[in-house]
Amino acid sequence: MSLSTRLCLVLLLTPLCWGQQPPSDLTARTLWLEDVSPDNDQLPPIHAARLQQARKASHAQSSPAAKPSSVNDATPGTPKDQSVRSAKSIPAVKHLGLRYNLLLVIDKSTSETMPVDSDRVFQPGDCVQLDLETNHSGYLYVLGRGSSGTWKALLPSPEMPDESNVVRSRTPVRVPVGYCYQVESPPGEEHIFVVLSRNPAELLALDDSIRNSSASATPAGELHQVTAMMTTENRLSDEVNKLQSILERRDLKIAKIGQPKDSKEPPGSVYVVNASDASPDNLVTEIKIRHQ
């Protein structure tokens, strides 16, 4: 083979090699746009996984000590719950991701908003909301931490125990709903913690700590109420700390877009995608709201 022929082959094969680069070389925006659930699968409510766990615990208590319990065990002749089967068979996905936009509320009476840059420094009195959109269906949790250091659930809201936080791909979610996140003095940073997952079994402790926090607001003795509130806050804080440790180990790709590249992309969009192959079904990220 002549030198010129070998050179031609190299030139022809080089673009093919470029086309075979692993997904890890792609940007977060590209992965979010290209890797999307084609069937927009419906996920079961989180209580289905809680029901499965409760049945497993109940079965373990009633079974003989010599026989270890199994998730697949069931009382003969008793049909298994369909929602539990669905919770166990959620398909895994790659490149679970979300796009978020910070919104400045222009008019509270009309709920008019304007997307702003994620690095914007807000002024006291500004009211902020958040738009979230995922590329796969999943369970979405949004928590905010103010200057007091206390975490508060924004989605699902503890005041709405039956509120669903199952989100569908390419379906925007506004947080918080019905009001906005008020920016107040002194200057600093407000932290928004976002958890997106397709594995409900890993979210039960977080979900319980959020939904049970409404119980601390029920009328009771003052000492009992304060103790219940502190216990709830500690539980929620512990769960956030666990998730933050996961965040430190997670292979996230993040892309900030200043000017939109198409009409469907809001200005100031931020894409966050889990590029890890070890645990692809979870995404944990933190959003900072800076203010003077």
Image (cartoon, rainbow, N blue to C red):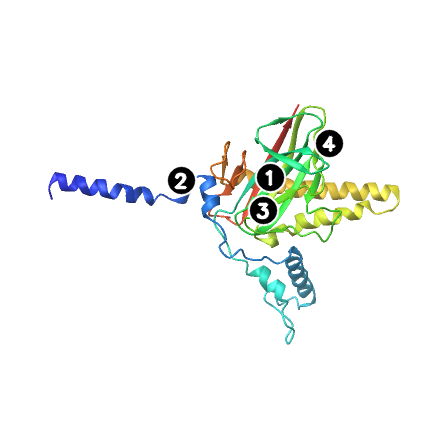
**Crowd rating for badge 2 (residues with CA inside 10 Å; few <14, some 14–19, many 20+):** few
The mark lying in front, picked from 2 and 1, is 2
Q: Which mark is residue 25?
A: 2
Which one is in front in this view, the residue at disc 1 or the one at disc 3? 3
86 and 68: which one is in front?
A: 86
Secondary structure at badge 1 equals: helix
Residue 114 in sight: yes
Q: Secondary structure at mark 2?
A: helix
Q: Earlier in the sequence, mark 4 or mark 1?
A: 4
Q: How many marks?
A: 4
Q: Amino acid at mark 1?
A: Gln
Task: Say which residue label 4 marks.
Answer: 148
Horizontal and vertical percent position of residue 240: 64, 41
**Residue at the image position 48 percent from the left and 55 percent from the top:** 38
Q: Is residue 68 visible?
A: no
Q: Position of residue 262 (x, y in %)?
A: 48, 39
Q: What amino acid is found at the position of numbered circle 4 in the picture?
A: Ser
Q: Nearer the viewer, mark 4 or mark 1?
A: 4
Q: Which residue is mark 3?
A: 196
Residue 244 bears which disc, if any? 1
Do labels 2 and 4 touch, CB within 8 Å? Answer: no
- Give the residue displayed 57% in from the left and 53% down from the top: 199
Q: Secondary structure at mark 3?
A: strand
Mark closest to the chain's N terminus, 1 or 3: 3
Instruction: Compute the Cα span from label 4 to label 1.
Output: 19 Å
What amino acid type should be assigned to the residue bearing mark 2? Asp
| Crowd rating for badge 4 (residues with CA inside 10 Å; few <14, some 14–19, many 20+) | few
